[in-house]
Image (cartoon, rainbow, N blue to C red):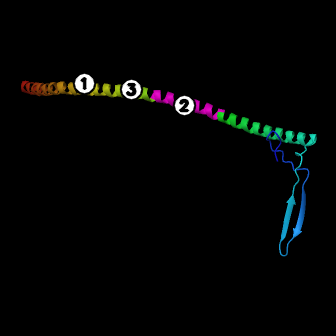
Amino acid sequence: TTSASGFPLNLKPVTSTGAIGAVTSTAAITTTTTPSAPPVMTYAQLESLINKWSLELEDQEKHFLHQATQVNAWDRMLIENGEKITSLHREVEKVKVDQKRLDQELDFILSQQKELEDLLTPLEESVKEQSGTIYLQHADEE
């Protein structure tokens, strides 16, 4: 049953009459209800329902606040981790730039080393030839 406001009150009608009649092999139940007055609720029943609803509301509020706190903690953690990821991404990009610069410097050093080797090879050969002739001249003088 519902009250005039539309809230279920779980009340039973005050009046109801029933008559039970017997048929040869089965029992049939016949109920007749007379137009009855709306259910009557006592102040104690109303107070009991209000207290019950208040307790349910408090429980739901506690549950909601617990979940909201948990969601806020997750949100903070996501924001912090997002900032960490952004920072790490910036650092990785800096490292990539530094790595590229180092690769270019190494290539430059390798090219200089190759140039120096190309310049030193003829000089080394010249020194070998001259030292060989110096030894020969020294041997001839003795």
Please state the extent of the stretch shown in magenta in the rendering: 72-91
Marks 3 and 1 sit apart, C-alpha to C-alpha, by 23 Å
Name the residue type under label 3.
Answer: Val
- The answer to whether residue 52 is left or right of residue 72 is right
**Which residue is drawn at the image coordinates 67% and 36% (left, top)?**
70
Question: On the image, numbered disc 3 is attached to which residue?
Answer: 97
Farthest-out residue, left: 140
Foreground label between 1 and 2: 2
Within-10-Å neighbours for mark 2: few <14, some 14–19, many 20+: few
Residue at the image point whose x is 84% and y is 42% from the top: 52
Residue 90 highlighted magenta (yes or no): yes
State left or right for residue 4 relative to residue 71.
Answer: right
- Left or right of residue 119: residue 80: right
Q: Are marks 2 and 3 in contact (CB under 8 Å)?
A: no
Please rate how many residues cluster around mark 1, counting C-alpha atoms within 10 Å: few if below 14, some from 14 to 19, many from 20. Answer: few
**How far apart are labels 1 and 2 at the CA level?**
45 Å
- Secondary structure type for disc 3: helix
Residue 82: which numbered mark, if any? 2
Distance between the alpha carbons at the discs numbered 2 and 3 = 23 Å
Q: Is residue 142 above or below residue 55?
A: above
Which is nearer the N-term, disc 2 or disc 3?
Answer: 2
For the residue pair 23 and 93, the one nearer the viewer reads as 23
Q: Residue 103 sits in which quadrant?
A: top left
Which amino acid, by three-letter code, is at mark 2?
Gly
